[in-house]
Image: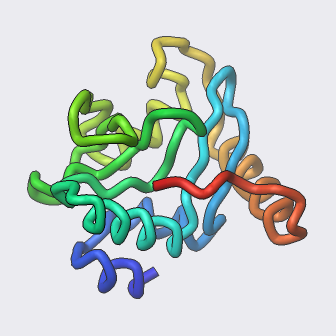
């Protein structure tokens, strides 16, 4: 995980790095929302593509809704970085979702990202991540490649 930090030139939040150690990439439904946590290598590649396509590099995507929105660290701010919802096509239409990764995780856990309040325990989230990682290791699918 430290390789990822070196590759993107940032010190990333410990909770996010722990998530990567637990399940380096995960995809599935939590409540009514689909979320894809990118693998460390996918985060690196997404950053490379952003730079190749002339994006500012301000946002470091670490997850997606599987459609048009990336969840990203706003790296223009000081750490801990705010979490934003970002249009995949450009840097326009960015909405701050949480003050930091810890708050993002809690909002996901308590289903407050989309205004629906269904509560999930840390154990349920951890179980979801482990099951998703096991499926990906078997090669039975996994999240689509994202930019």
| 145 relative to 115 in the view: left or right | right
Total marks in image: 0
Q: Nearer the viewer, residue 108 or 94?
A: 94
Q: How is the image coloured?
A: rainbow
Instruction: Please determine whether, in this image, residue 10 is positioned above or below residue 147.
Output: below
**Rendering quarter of residue 84:** top left
Q: Nearer the viewer, residue 93 or 15?
A: 93
Q: Nearer the viewer, residue 31 or 69?
A: 69
Q: Residue at x 67, y 32 (%)?
A: 30
Instruction: Please determine whether, in this image, residue 44 is positioned above or below residue 127.
Output: below
Instruction: Please determine whether, in this image, residue 61 is positioned above or below residue 107.
Output: below
How far across and how far down the image is residue 113, in percent? 45, 24
- The residue at the far front in this view is 53
**Rendering quarter of residue 65:** top right
**Rendering quarter of residue 43:** bottom left
Q: Residue at x 29, y 60 (%)?
A: 53
Q: Nearer the viewer, residue 33 or 13?
A: 33
In the rendered image, the quadrant that contains the C terminus is bottom left
Q: Residue at x 60, y 39 (%)?
A: 66
Q: Is residue 80 shown to the viewer in this render?
A: no
How far across and how far down the image is residue 63, in percent? 49, 49
Q: Is residue 99 shown to the viewer in this render?
A: yes
- The residue at the far top in this view is 116
| 1 relative to 97 in the view: left or right | right
How far across and how far down the image is residue 112, in percent? 46, 21
How far across and how far down the image is residue 102, in percent? 37, 47
Instruction: Please determine whether, in this image, residue 39 is positioned above or below residue 78.
Output: below
Q: Residue at x 28, y 46 (%)?
A: 100
């Amino acid at each position: 995980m430290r390789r990822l930090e070196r590759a993107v030139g940032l010190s990333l939040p410990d909770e996010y790095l722990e998530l990567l150690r637990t399940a380096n990439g995960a995809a599935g439904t939590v409540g009514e929302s689909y979320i894809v946590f990118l693998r460390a290598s996918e985060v690196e590649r997404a950053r490379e593509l952003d730079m190749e396509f002339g994006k500012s590099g301000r946002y470091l995507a670490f997850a997606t809704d599987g459609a048009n929105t990336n969840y990203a660290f706003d790296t223009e701010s000081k750490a801990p970085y705010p979490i934003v919802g970002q249009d995949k096509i450009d840097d326009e239409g960015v909405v701050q979702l949480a003050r930091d990764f810890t708050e993002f995780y809690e909002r996901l856990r308590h289903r407050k990202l989309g205004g629906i309040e269904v509560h999930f325990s840390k154990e349920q989230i951890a179980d979801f991540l482990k099951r998703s990682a096991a499926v990906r290791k078997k090669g039975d699918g996994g999240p689509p490649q994202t930019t």
